[in-house]
């Protein structure tokens, strides 16, 4: 499946762009946008990996490098699992 890509123009202050080629800035901006959508739960890891042209493991490594939790497992998930375990025992 081919994705339709939007072209976006962004003004970048010199202190952000210093020493970076425009293509490099565009790649970094896309990476950060995809990571944020993943962090918010809007995109799956597999979809993010495909958008960035990475394998799933490489995307998860990227998440770790940027401090984005690769697995969503909160206290409510833990409590649900405990209740399921307790229910299956008796």
Image (tube, rainbow, N blue to C red):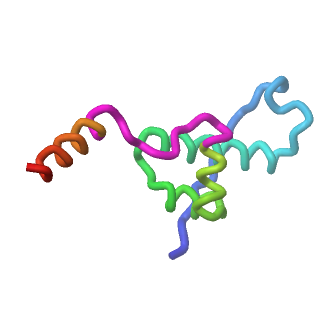
Residue 48, position as x, y percentages in the image: 54, 56
Residue 38 belongs to magenta span? no
Residue 6, position as x, y percentages in the image: 58, 55
**Residue 85 versus residue 14 in the image, above or below:** below
Residue 33, position as x, y percentages in the image: 58, 42
- Name the residue furthest bottom: 1
Would residue 17 be found to the left or right of residue 53 on screen? right
Q: Looking at the image, which residue is at 60% across and 34% down?
A: 67
- Name the residue furthest front: 90
Residue 32, position as x, y percentages in the image: 63, 41
For the residue pair 4 and 49, the one nearer the viewer reads as: 49
Residue 75 belongs to magenta span? yes
Res. 28 image quadrant: top right
| Extent of the magenta region | 64-77
For the residue pair 60 and 3, the one nearer the viewer reads as: 60
Q: Please identify the dominant SS of the magenta region.
A: loop
Would residue 82 be found to the left or right of residue 21 on screen? left
For the residue pair 55 and 10, the one nearer the viewer reads as: 55
**Residue 11 versus residue 61 in the image, above or below:** above
For the residue pair 2 and 56, the one nearer the viewer reads as: 56
- Name the residue furthest right: 19
Q: Looking at the image, which residue is at 63% across and 64% down?
A: 55
Q: Looking at the image, which residue is at 50% across and 60% down?
A: 47
Would residue 31 be found to the left or right of residue 80 on screen? right
Q: Looking at the image, which residue is at 59% across and 51% down?
A: 60
């Amino acid at each position: 499946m081919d994705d339709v890509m939007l072209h976006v123009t962004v003004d970048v202050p010199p202190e952000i762009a210093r020493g970076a080629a425009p293509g490099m800035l565009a790649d970094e901006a896309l990476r950060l946008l995809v990571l944020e959508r993943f962090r918010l739960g809007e995109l799956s890891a597999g979809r993010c990996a495909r958008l960035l042209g990475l394998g799933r493991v490489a995307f998860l490594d990227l998440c770790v490098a940027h401090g984005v939790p690769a697995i969503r497992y909160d206290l409510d998930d833990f409590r649900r699992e405990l209740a399921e375990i307790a229910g299956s025992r008796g």
